[in-house]
């Protein structure tokens, strides 16, 4: 293989006569093209533009003078365009198909929101611009804050947190600040139900609290008696998700909130599943003290590979004094920003600057274009779609809990018992059918979980196709065709990967092939 001056291969590997795996001459599968790393496409001296020779100059960098090239690959412009276009087409996205990843609310991102976010007055603002020049952006943030407070019934909000988990951290810091303000330092524990998203115990631990787990009842909800038994003067608060990660509404939520308050604790609600209840129930009316909202879930801003998160946090009257800076106020000369915490009880700020402006714009655009009736319908349709999937699959798969469910439906692997097929095998076979798999092996409260969240933006036709594929796979598994499942996925560019090695020993850095230095030195 020819090597470039940095010792890297300078050409795409030569053609094999027929690729053993694909049976094609190129190794490509139709329009799925094998894509070498950009470094593997490097050719010495190749460049997208012609630049004049640099006249020789004496270096003034002294000891920091570069000793070798930094090793940027040399490619022509069309090569670069093809490389990144091909890579982008390998992504599965909500724009490609149904994305039933439970807990993630992968709903359509309306294009109207994208248009609004690209308006220059929102897209081109700089966080250090004088306040007088960003009045429109501040008005937008103020309007978003207003609607978030209205929809949740809460007294205060911070827009700053960059994601749900960051919002959790903000909420738990507010709870700690509130206890400290009362001189109460005996509260060292946070209670977290077994079914919680992993970010909940991680947040509590990161904030220095011991995490106590609360068991679930046979019907998938928090065990109220077990919770009450753990409450005491050492408990700072409870972190609870509602609807919970089994897709179920916590029926005892008011009794739970009352018990936590009676013991002197605060109630943190993980609001990532707000999509199931938005426009129908106000968390404040359920006794919640503080809750994060994932704008990238409930309010349709793109996430995953598609964009950053945004996790505003709402606060009850009791915790409103602890809301971090910055926040927008109405001053004598228009909108103003409070940037300093001053001597108050608040704990400062969560991040530099003011949050994800593009996400604020998309979320407000979503809210205003839906209106109150539209949001009410969206949450209703999200619940309807999940129940439709559950009802259509219940006879061939095992639903973990009696329905109806909320926005997502949970199955476990009892229907695979004795077949030799696992939850993972079903997920791999679904990929061959052109679907992104559901969330697997979460929540941990059931064995071999399959958590499906269709969201309200899937049509009945697309749900029926997904249901049809899953029904056929469940029946095939029961029919004993283990070999079929163990060989899946068959149609993807890569088949089964060693997932343990990928997680434990990820190779994130390209290094020149062994011996390359010697070749380059010749
Ligand atoms: C998504 C999610 C989170 C975390 O939100 P991020 O924005 O991914 O940090 C927390 N809890 C639940 C229940 C979630 O679904």
Image (tube, helix red, strand yellow):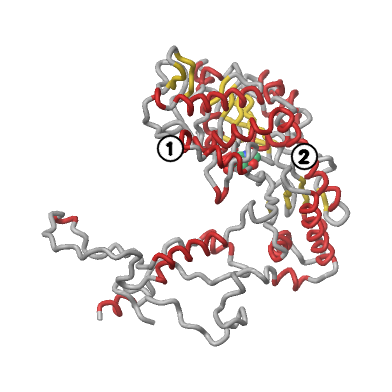
**Relative to residue 114, is residue 15 depicted above or below?**
below
Q: CA distance from mark 1 to mark 2?
A: 36 Å
Residue indicated by mark 2? 381
Residue at left offset 83%, top offset 70%:
480
Measured from the top left, where is residue 228 in percent x and y? 71, 26
Closest to the observer: 387 or 131?
131
Q: Which residue occupies the extreme right position in the image?
A: 395
Point out the tag, 1 or 2, that comes first from the N-terminus.
Answer: 1
The reply to whether callout 1 and callout 2 are in contact (CB within 8 Å) is no
Measured from the top left, where is residue 479 in percent x and y? 85, 68
Picture quarter with the N terminus? bottom left
Instruction: Tell which quarter ligand 1 is in.
Output: top right
Residue at left offset 66%, top offset 21%:
153
Classed neighbour count for the residue bearing mark 2: other residues with Cα under 10 Å, few (<14), some (14–19), many (≥20): some
| Quarter of the figure with residue 519 | bottom left
Measured from the top left, where is residue 407 in percent x and y? 74, 41
| Quarter of the figure with residue 213 | top right
Q: How many marks overall? A: 2
Residue at left offset 44%, top offset 20%:
336
Residue indicated by mark 1? 124
The mark closer to the camera, 1 or 2, is 1
Measured from the top left, where is residue 274 in percent x and y? 68, 34
**Relative to residue 189, is residue 471 depicted above or below?**
below
Q: Which residue occupies the extreme top position in the image?
A: 332
Classed neighbour count for the residue bearing mark 1: other residues with Cα under 10 Å, few (<14), some (14–19), many (≥20): few
């Amino acid at each position: 293989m020819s090597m470039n001056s940095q010792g890297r291969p300078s050409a795409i590997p030569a053609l094999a006569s027929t690729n053993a795996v694909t049976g094609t001459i190129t190794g490509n599968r139709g329009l799925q093209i094998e894509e070498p790393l950009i470094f593997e496409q490097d050719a010495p001296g190749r460049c997208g533009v012609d630049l004049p020779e640099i006249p020789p100059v004496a270096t003034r960098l002294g000891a920091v003078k570069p000793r070798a090239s930094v090793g940027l690959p040399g490619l022509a412009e069309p090569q670069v365009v093809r490389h990144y276009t091909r890579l982008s087409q390998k992504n599965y996205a909500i724009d490609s198909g149904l994305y039933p990843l439970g807990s993630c609310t992968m709903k359509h991102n309306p294009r109207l929101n994208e248009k609004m976010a690209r308006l220059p007055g929102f897209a081109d603002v700089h966080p250090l611009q004088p306040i007088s020049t960003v009045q429109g952006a501040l008005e937008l943030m103020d309007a978003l804050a207003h609607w978030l407070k209205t929809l949740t019934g809460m007294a205060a909000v911070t827009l700053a947190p960059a994601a749900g988990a960051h919002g959790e951290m903000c909420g738990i810091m507010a709870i700690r600040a509130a206890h400290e303000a009362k001189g109460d330092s005996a509260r060292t524990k946070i209670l977290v139900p077994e079914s919680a998203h992993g970010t909940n115990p991680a947040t509590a631990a990161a904030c220095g609290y011991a995490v106590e787990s609360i068991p679930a009842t046979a019907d998938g909800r928090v065990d109220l008696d077990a919770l009450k038994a753990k409450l005491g003067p050492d408990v700072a608060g409870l972190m609870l998700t509602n609807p919970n990660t089994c897709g179920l509404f916590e029926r005892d939520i008011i009794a739970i909130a009352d018990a936590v308050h009676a013991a002197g604790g605060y109630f943190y609600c993980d609001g990532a599943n707000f999509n199931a209840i938005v426009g129908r129930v106000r968390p404040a009316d359920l006794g919640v003290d503080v809750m994060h909202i994932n704008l990238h879930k409930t309010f349709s801003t793109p996430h995953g590979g598609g964009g950053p998160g945004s996790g505003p946090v709402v606060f009850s009257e009791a915790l409103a004094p602890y809301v971090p800076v910055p926040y927008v106020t109405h001053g004598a000369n228009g909108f103003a920003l409070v940037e300093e915490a001053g001597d108050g009880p608040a704990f400062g700020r969560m991040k530099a600057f003011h949050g994800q402006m593009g996400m604020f714009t998309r979320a407000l655009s979503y809210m205003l274009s839906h209106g109150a009736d539209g949001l009410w319908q969206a949450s209703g349709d999200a619940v309807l779609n999940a129940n439709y999937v559950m009802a259509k699959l219940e006879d061939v798969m095992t639903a973990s809990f009696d329905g109806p469910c909320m926005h997502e439906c949970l199955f476990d692997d009892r229907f695979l018992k004795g077949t030799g097929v696992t939850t993972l095998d079903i997920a791999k076979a679904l990929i061959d059918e052109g679907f992104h798999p559901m969330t697997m092996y979460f929540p941990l409260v059931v064995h071999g979980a399959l958590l499906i969240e269709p969201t309200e933006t899937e049509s009945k036709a697309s749900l029926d196709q997904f249901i049809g594929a899953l029904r056929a796979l469940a029946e095939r598994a029961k029919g004993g065709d283990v070999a079929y499942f163990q060989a899946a996925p068959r149609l993807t560019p890569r088949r089964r990967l060693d997932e343990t090695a990928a997680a434990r020993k990820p190779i994130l850095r390209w290094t020149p092939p062994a011996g390359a230095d010697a070749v380059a030195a010749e």
